[in-house]
Amino acid sequence: MSESKFQLTVVSPDKCLVRDLEIKAVGAKGTEGDFTALPGHIPFLTDLKPGLMWYRVEAQGPVEEILIGGGFVEVLPDKVTVLADSAERPDEIDPNRAEQSRLRAIEAYNKAKEKAQAEGRSLVGDIEIEKAELKIRKAVARIKASKKPGRVEH
């Protein structure tokens, strides 16, 4: 492998989207903020937020994207490994199904909120509310990814 590239692997519980692909750059949405990593990057490990991750095989080449539903990323100087809760390419997403998921997630959120209020519990830190919020974020990310008109430049 060239010193100006590093390897990318992206896996989810049901599939491997990328295995040991030599790339020039990668970026994603971490819980501490968006990041871009290049070969030789200082090592770090972080949680991933639902959203698009991107990578380039060539410095001036096209940006490839994968929708991540959350998970973890480990960045090493010569390798990036993404362990995703779910992962799919934007062209695999059915926008209608994503919208249906969003509506179901909003309904679950409203029910969880009403239940917590009826029981006099705090809405902050309620596990059912947090689960529903995560489902809403994932569905919205899927909708945005499916309607994206072309590639972004990073």
Image (cartoon, rainbow, N blue to C red):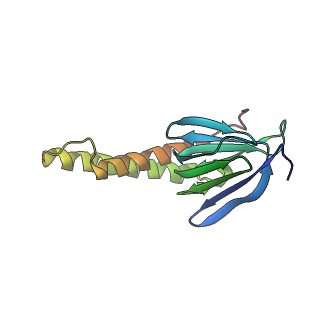
Does 139 sit left or right of 5 as displayed? left
Q: Quadrant of the C terminus?
A: top right
Q: Looking at the picture, how far across and down is residue 63, in whole percent?
A: 75, 41
Q: Residue at x 19, y 48 (%)?
A: 116
Q: Looking at the picture, how far across and down is residue 125, in whole percent?
A: 28, 45
The residue positioned farthest toward the right in the image shown: 2
34 vs 22: above or below? above
The front one of 75 and 51 is 75
Q: Looking at the picture, how far across and down is residue 92, in whole percent?
A: 65, 55
Q: Residue at x 56, y 65 (%)?
A: 13
Q: Residue at x 20, y 42 (%)?
A: 122
**Quarter assignment of residue 62:** top right
Q: Looking at the picture, how far across and down is residue 30, in whole percent?
A: 54, 41
The front one of 55 and 24 is 24
Q: Residue at x 43, y 50 (%)?
A: 135
The residue positioned farthest toward the bottom in the image shown: 14
Does 71 sit left or right of 146 as displayed? left
149 vs 111: above or below? above
- Picture mark count: 0
